[in-house]
Amino acid sequence: MTKAPWLTIIGIGEDGRAGLSPAASAALDRAEFIIGGARHLGLAAPLSAQTQFWPSPFADGYPMVLARRGQPTCVLATGDPFHYGIGAELARLVPADEIVCHPQPSAFSLAAARLGWSLPDCDCVSLHGRALERIIPSLQPGNRILTLSWDGSTPGKLADLLKARGMGASTITVLEAMGGTRERIRRAIANTFDIVDIDPLNTVAIETLASRDARVVPLTPGLPDPWFENDGQLTKAEIRALTLAALAPKAGELLWDIGLGAGSVGTEWCLRHPRNRCIGIEERAERAERARRNAQELGATALDIRIGQAPEALADLPAPDAVFIGGGASEPGVFDTAWTALKPGGRLVVNAVTLETETLLGTLYARHGGTMRRLALSRLEAVGAMHGWRAAMPVTQWMVVKP
């Protein structure tokens, strides 16, 4: 049975009450309880209802909202509450038919309007409460990027990141407190970034200009091997590209990378789509830390690394959409645990370089079907003053889809 809406989520801008619709203002006046940040409550004043600042941690405020179920309650947010805002979190707790939302233009919309940019042609990235490296995959030549800042230090950190990656000629525009009396727009080149006293409420626009040797993350799988710090435990670029093709990542899927090594497969899985996630299992702490550095350097911030040994380390993990076993496939229980956890229709890929693991794959192939292939790779290398082909160890790859 549908319940009457009792929760109103109101996006408020820097112009405060003056920018609200009559319906949003009326909801504030009817509310018995209003929760928001100190800035939001100040912008919405005067308020006659009981008010509450969001606590820290933020999630502690959700029970306060849910305790008011059935009573007129308002949540104040910035701009569009369903665009990197609190709206989606509340909608997981409260049915949509019990919510009314009055959004304002998002910071992305305001920034695009100020700059005359086509919003669909921009990469929109939130760095608020998120790792700075999250922006790295978007640092493409000629790209336009809009980012939500964490605080006033974010623009300077972005300038440093651009310089470090060979994109110091890029233009950075800092848009502060858009829509209010404190609004300010300033520009600088990353190489000579000198903007100071930046308001914590800011959005950054980047027009990327990359040098010829800039460190740009390509859109194809099979990134160069030297981009991954490693101790020899690395799935080589050509084999990695074929492995990603066999895993067939789709948007928003979760991969288990068992025997993470340098983290190259898990990292590239995450790079295939912004919503893709990977849980990597690595028993050696130094390798796990190395994989973490590799992922961060390439902007794969959704790689979650767990130190432990399979199959024990696989217990209680969320069910994967795909599994890659790059090491430890012959350990007792590893395949069975992964296969049991894998979702129906999920893909499992195992790469083997030893005869023992290859023999196991033959047994698994006979039991479960799938496809097998032998991957042999040779690279041209110097032989004294001349050149010759040096063969890498062949890889036997088994791929199977769970019924």
Image (spheres, helix red, strand yellow):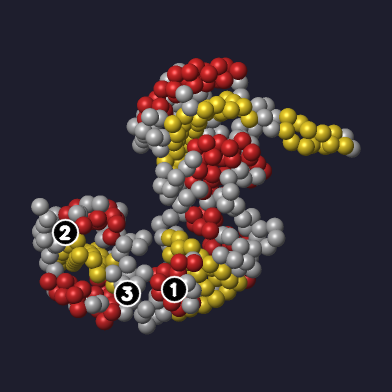
| Label 3 – label 2 distance at C-alpha | 24 Å
Left/right placement of residue 276 relative to residue 229 reads left
Q: Nearer the viewer, residue 86 or 361?
A: 361
- Mark 1 or 2 closer to N-term? 2
Amino acid carrying label 3: it is Gly
Amino acid carrying label 1: it is Ala
For disc 3, the marked residue is 13
Q: Is residue 347 above or below residue 111?
A: above
Q: Position of residue 138 (x, y in %)?
A: 53, 58
- What is the secondary structure assignment of the residue under circle 2? helix
Q: Is residue 324 above or below residue 220?
A: above
Left/right placement of residue 275 relative to residue 60 reads right
For disc 2, the marked residue is 98
> Which mark is on residue 234?
none
- What is the secondary structure assignment of the residue under circle 3? loop
For disc 1, the marked residue is 111
